Amino acid sequence: MNNVPTYDPAALEAKWQTRWAERRTNEPDLDGAARPFYNLMMFPYPSAEGLHVGNMFAFTGADIYGRFKRLQGHDVFEPIGFDAFGIHSENYALSVGTNPALLIPQNVDNFRRQLKRFGGMFDWRHELSTTDPAYYKWTQWLFLQLFNAGLAYKKRAAVNWCPKDKTVLANEQVINGRCERCDTPVEQRFLDQWFFRITAFAERLLANLDHLDWSSSTATLQRNWIGRSEGAELTFESPAGAKITVFTTRPDTVFGATYLVLAPEHPLVDALTTEEQRAAVKAYQREAQGKDVVSRRVGEKTKTGVFTGSYARNPATGEAIPVWLADYVLMEYGTGAIMAVPAHDKRDFEFATQFDLPIRQVVKVEGESLPSVSEDGTLMASGAFDGLPCREGARKIVAWLAATRLATARVQYRLHDWCISRQRYWGPPIPIIYCDNCGPVGVPERDLPVELPFIEDFRPDDTGVSPLARHKEWYFVKCPQCGRQGRRETDVSDTFLDSSWYYLRYPSTEFADRPFDPARTKKWLPVTTYIGGNEHAVLHLLYSRFISMVLKDLGHIHFEEPFPKLRAHGLIVKDGAKMSKSRGNVVIPDAYIRQWGADTFRMYLMFLGPFQEGGDFRETGIIGIRRFIDKVWQLAHEARGDGPLAPAVERKLHQTIRKVTTDTESLDYNTAIAAMMEYVNELRESGVGSRESVKPLVVMLAPYAPHLAEELWERLGHETSVFGARWPAYDERLATTGDVEIAVQVNGKLRSRLTVPRGLAQDDVVARALADESVKRFVDGQPVKKVIYVQDRLVNLVI
RNA sequence: GCCCGGGUGGCGAAAUUGGUAGACGCAAGGGACUUAAAAUCCCUUGGGGGCAACCCCAUGCAGGUUCGAGUCCUGCCCCGGGCACCA
C-alpha cells in the first residue's frame, strides 16, 4: 500500500518538458495535417516584470482548450510570440536609461522561460517577435498595400501632447486628461499623421458581427465603438448664401430647431461672422483651441459659446435662427454643425438656458417635462406633421425637405479613421520617402525592411518630430522614383499595426520571402478559436478584422473575418483591483510554480472561478487542488488489474466524462474540475479498483495538468504520449442507469424525497408519494386537485 | 448620463435555463493516528427552533406572474467594466 512514490512536480515537469521538446510533441505537421485546428491566444507584450498571473490565467485557459481539441483528434497548432514594439516598452527603457533594443530581448527571454515552465502546448518553431526585422518587413509591406490601395492618407490632426515629458501620447496613455506617467494635463497639438481609412469599412465591420461566433460582451463593445446612427443631413441657408449642413438623428424635431451651433473649427465660421462679432469669435476660437482635449470633452459641464452675428433659415419653418459657435459641438463627428432643439436635447437645453435662447416644444410625451428626449411621442407645433408619431414624422419630414434638396437620409458612425503615426522611436519605421519632385513615395518592396536604426538618444523632444529625424545617415535617402535626394518618413507605426496581422504570420514564419504562404494560409486560416481578453475588444480585434478585409479585397487572402470564433476570458484582479505596476499589486506566478508545480497552479487558476468571468487572485485554496492531485496520484498507483468497473463507479465515470466533455468545450473549466473531483471521491469511497477506472480520468486531466497526466499515463503502462490518446467517450445509457431521487412537493413545498427506478410512470410515483408518511401528514386526507409531474425529477401534489 | 456584466453560506463558487438552493473546494470546529507536530483519515458546518423524526426562515430590496421563482416580469439599491457634450 505505502510503496506509492512521492509526487515530485518539479522533477516530473522538467522531465516532460524536455521530452516534449525532444520528441517534438507540440509541433504539428503544418503541411500534412488532416484536421487543422488553429488555437490562438493573444500574444503578450513582454513587460519587465514578467508574465503575471493574469496572462497565465488566459494562456492556461486557452492551452486547455487546445490540448482538449488535440485529444479529440485535431491537429492543433498553438503558436506564441511577443508583441514587443510600442510605447510601453520604450517608456520603460527610458525610465531605466537603456535602449529598448537591448532591454526587450532580456524581457523576451524571461517570458519565454515562463511560458515553457507553465507547460503550454506551444509550437516554438513558429515563435515570432514583432521587433524582428524579418517580421516588421512585412508590417511595412502591409502599410504599403494600404498606401497603394488609397487606404492610407496623411492629414493634420490633433494629438495628445504631454508638455512635461515633451512627447506625443497615445489615447490609452491619457488617463482622465492627464499623462499616465507624470500626471500633467495633456494638451492638444496639431501634427501631420498617417491614417488608415477604416471608416470606409464601418458598415461591413458592423454587419459581419451578426454572423461571428463571438462572446456577446465583445461583440457589444465593438458595436458600440463603431456607433452607427441613422438620421439625416439638413441644410440651413443664410441670407448671404452660405449653406450650413447639419447632421441629426431627430429630423422629426426640426420645427423646434431655434438656433444652430458650429464647432469652433468649422470652415464656415469666418464667412458667417459679422464685423461686430469678429473679435469675440476669434477670442473664442483661440480659447477652444488652447483647451486640452479632455476639459473640452468631459471636464466642464457649463456650456460656453459665442454668437456669430449671422442667421440661417430653418428649412421647415422658414424662420431665421441665430448661428452660434460652441465647443460642445465636435468637428470630428457628423458635419461639425448641429441644429439645436433645446426642448428635446439635454445639451441644447442647457445651452439655450444659459444664453437665453428660445425653447420650442414640438414633441408631446405623456408625463415628461422638458427637455424630453424620448422618441415615443407625437409631433406638435410642426405644421402638417402634427399628431404623427416621431419615427413616422421623421421619415415624412425628410421626404418633404428632400424635394427641395434640403434634406438627405444619412448614416453616421462614431468610428474614426485609424491614426497609425507615432512620433516615437520604438516601432517599425513607416516605409515612405518624401521627395520634392515626386511627393510621398512608398519604399519599394525590394528595399524592405526599412530597418529601425540603433540610436543612442531616442528620447522624444518637444519639436513633435520623431527621434529618427536626428539620425541623418538614415534620414536622407535617394528617392526610389527619380533618384534625387529625399527624406524618410520619421514616424513609426502604431503597435496595433504589428498585432493586426500576427496570426497570419505564425504558420509561415519560416518563409523569408513572403508574409504568409498561400498554401499554409489556405490550410490554417482563418483562426479556429481565438481566446483573449476584452481589453482588446475594440482596438486590436477591430483593426485585425479591418486588415483582413483589406487583404481579402486585395486578393491576398481567401477570408475577410480572421476570427470566426472568439471567446473572451475574464480578468484576474487582486484585492478587487486590476493588476498594475502603479498599484503595486502585480502577482508573478514563478514563486507559486516553484512551490506547487505548474500543474497544480494551472488547475488552481482555472478553479478560482468561471474562466469567462475571472476573479480575485488569492492564495488560499491552492492546497485543495494539490490534495486532489495527490489523490489522483495515489489512485493511479494503487489501481490493480484491468477488470470491469463496479456499477456505481461505471455510472459515475460516464456521468463525469459527459460533464467534463461539455464543460471543457464551453470553457467552464471550474465545474469540469469539480466533476473530476467528485469522480475521485467516488473512486476512493469504492475502494481500490481497476486501472480502467483511472485511465479515462488521466486523459480528461491531461488538458488541465499535462505533466501529471503524461507521467501517470506512462506509469499505467503506455509508451506513447497521453496526447496521442483519444478523449474518452461516454455512453448515455450507462450515465443514466440506476435509481433517481424524486422531490415530492405538497402545494409547492418540498415535503419528502423518494428514491425510485428511473423512468417510473407517473401513477406509480404518485402512489408511492401518497404512501409516504411525511407527505400523508400534509395531505391530511384532503383530495388532490392537481398533480404536477416532471419525469425523474419532481412530483407536486396540489390540494 | 448611456451600454454591457454581476449581487447566492465565514470565503471562492454550483444549480441540467421555471422543478430537491448551496455540488466542488477553502476556512473553521470536533475526533482518530502520533511522545509531539506536520501530513493523512473520519464527523460537523446557511440562520433559527426541537431530545428527536422534523418544522420555520433564507439567493441585494419591494412588488408581481406561476402548482412551483436564484432563474421570468415591473420598480428600486449597490458593485465591476466599457463609452462619454457623438447631435
Image (cartoon, coloured by chain):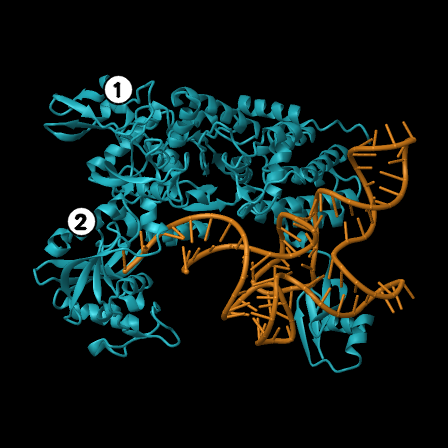
Chain colours: A cyan, B orange
Q: Name the element at disc 1.
A: loop
Residue A661 horizontal/vertical position (percent):
59, 46
A715 lies left or right of A616: right
- Please name the residue shown 74% across and 73% down the image: A766
Amino acid type of the residue tagged 2 in the rendering: Lys
In front of the other: label 1 or label 2?
Answer: 2
A49 lies left or right of A492: right
Question: Can see residue A645?
Answer: no
Residue on which the image places disc 1: A471
Measure the alpha-carbon separation of dots 1 and 2.
40 Å
- Please name the residue shown 81% across and 73% down the image: A771
Name the subunit of mark 2. A
Question: Can see residue A489?
Answer: yes
Amino acid type of the residue tagged 1 in the rendering: His
- Please name the residue shown 56% across and 30% down the image: A119
Mark 1 or mark 2: name the one nearer the start of the chain: 2
Q: Quick one: A464 or A118, which is closer to the camera?
A: A464
Instruction: Report crowding for label 1: few under 14, some 14 to 19, many 20 or more residues within 10 A (C-alpha).
Output: some
Residue A482 horizontal/vertical position (percent):
11, 24
Check residue A282 in the rendering and tell me which mark sits there, or answer none. 2
> Does residue A483 sit above or below A402 in this rendering?
above
Q: Quadrant of the C terminus of chain A?
A: bottom right
Residue A324 horizontal/vertical position (percent):
20, 58
Do the residues under discs 1 and 2 have CB atoms within 8 angstroms?
A: no
Q: Quick one: A553 or A263, which is closer to the camera?
A: A263
Check residue A740 in the rendering and tell me which mark sits there, or answer none. none
- Please name the residue shown 34% across and 46% down the image: A294
Residue A481 horizontal/vertical position (percent):
13, 25
Q: Name the element at disc 2.
A: helix
The part of the image, by quadrant, that contains residue A150 is top left
> Does residue A290 sit above or below A744 in this rendering?
above
B24 lies left or right of A480: right
